[in-house]
Image (cartoon, grey):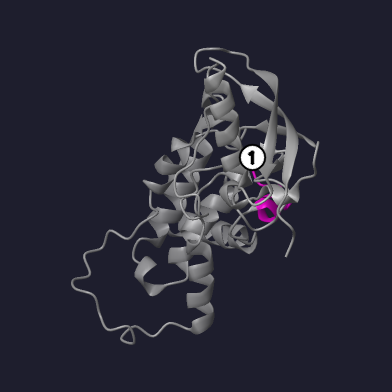
Amino acid sequence: MSETKNITVHLKVWRQKRNEKKGRFESYTVKDVSTDSSFLEMLDLLNEDLTKSGKEPLEFDSDCREGICGTCGLVINGVAHGPQQAIATCQLHMRKFKDGETLTIEPFRAKPFTPIKDLIVDRSAFDRIISKGGYVSTNAGSPQDANAILIPKKNSDLAMDAASCIGCGACVAACPNASASLFTSAKISQYALLPQGQPEATRRASQMVDQMDLEGFGNCSNHGECEAVCPKQITIANIARMRREFFKAALRS
């Protein structure tokens, strides 16, 4: 276990107001940062310093701070969610950085992620994709016994892995094409693998993919950056499944 100590970090942070077409980087220094503190707690310290000096605090998204909700999301030194794999920004701790290190902090950038302020972007495009089929609307009555519907363990495990996607948007921020294929495919896969999702499979695949394209996300070209930065380690095998489901939907229609 690493020893707790206090470090100083120099920050280059993106600042931008909603109505401004261009943002800018501003430089700050935060001192006496405990290596046991999280990255977002370090930004809280920065905002305390800014408030005390009469300056406008930095705006950034956070909620659960436990890597569950997907609200947080920053590009740190060019990497979505920072240097540690399989975690969200809120789970990143300052022990991963060196004393005196300079950190460049940016929002998730993509055309569909319109800037709101500073490090906050509007990710409601994901909500609109979900609204096109990321659910089961069939009235199936009261819950059945867990063993009443026989599902192969492999399928149930894969479905649960896909369902663990928290919709943070890191896959889009990391992709050179700003593709939302990993997110969309995870939301399609979690139902495509289970019998409960079959009655609406055709509508789900076609409408969710169409909405993804309508939002302005780019096409997947199998670079794999999305998988590398995903905090839940969603695999790009889901993208292949999404394509199969979309092709089957096209044949059926």
Q: Which residue is identified by label 1?
A: 173
Taking the spot 57% from the left edge, 17% from the top edge, the residue there is: 53
Q: Nearer the viewer, residue 237 or 22?
A: 22
Instruction: Please indicate, yes or no, whether residue 52 appears anywhere in the rendered image.
Output: yes
Q: Residue furthest left?
A: 141
How far across and how far down the image is residue 177, in percent?
68, 38
The residue positioned 50% from the left and 34% from the top of the image is 215
Q: Which residue type carries mark 1?
A: Ala
Quarter of the image containing the N terminus? bottom right
Above or below residue 124? Residue 12 is above
- Give left or right: position of 204 versus 142: right
Residue 54 % position (x, y): 53, 14
Q: In this rendering, is residue 208 above or below 242?
A: above
Query: Is 66 left or right of 228, judged from the image as shown?
Result: left
Task: In this rendered view, identify the residue nearer to me: 176 or 68.
Answer: 68
Mark 1 lies on a secondary structure that is helix
**Quadrant placement of the C terminus:** bottom left
Question: Which stretch appears magenta?
Answer: 219-229
**Magenta residue check for 20:** no
**Which residue is depicted at the point 61% across and 39% down?**
42
- Was residue 221 drawn as part of the magenta stretch in this picture? yes
Say which residue appears at 69% left-offset and 46% top-offset: 82
Residue 46 is situated, as x and y percent measured from the top left of the image, at 60, 30
Q: Observer-nearest residue: 186 or 19? A: 19
Q: Examine the rendering and report whether any part of residue 179 can be seen.
A: no
Dot 1 surroundings within 10 Å: few (below 14), some, or many (20 or more)?
Answer: many
Of residues 27 and 130, the one drawn nearer to the viewer in this rendering? 27
Residue 241: give x, y in percent of width and height.
57, 63
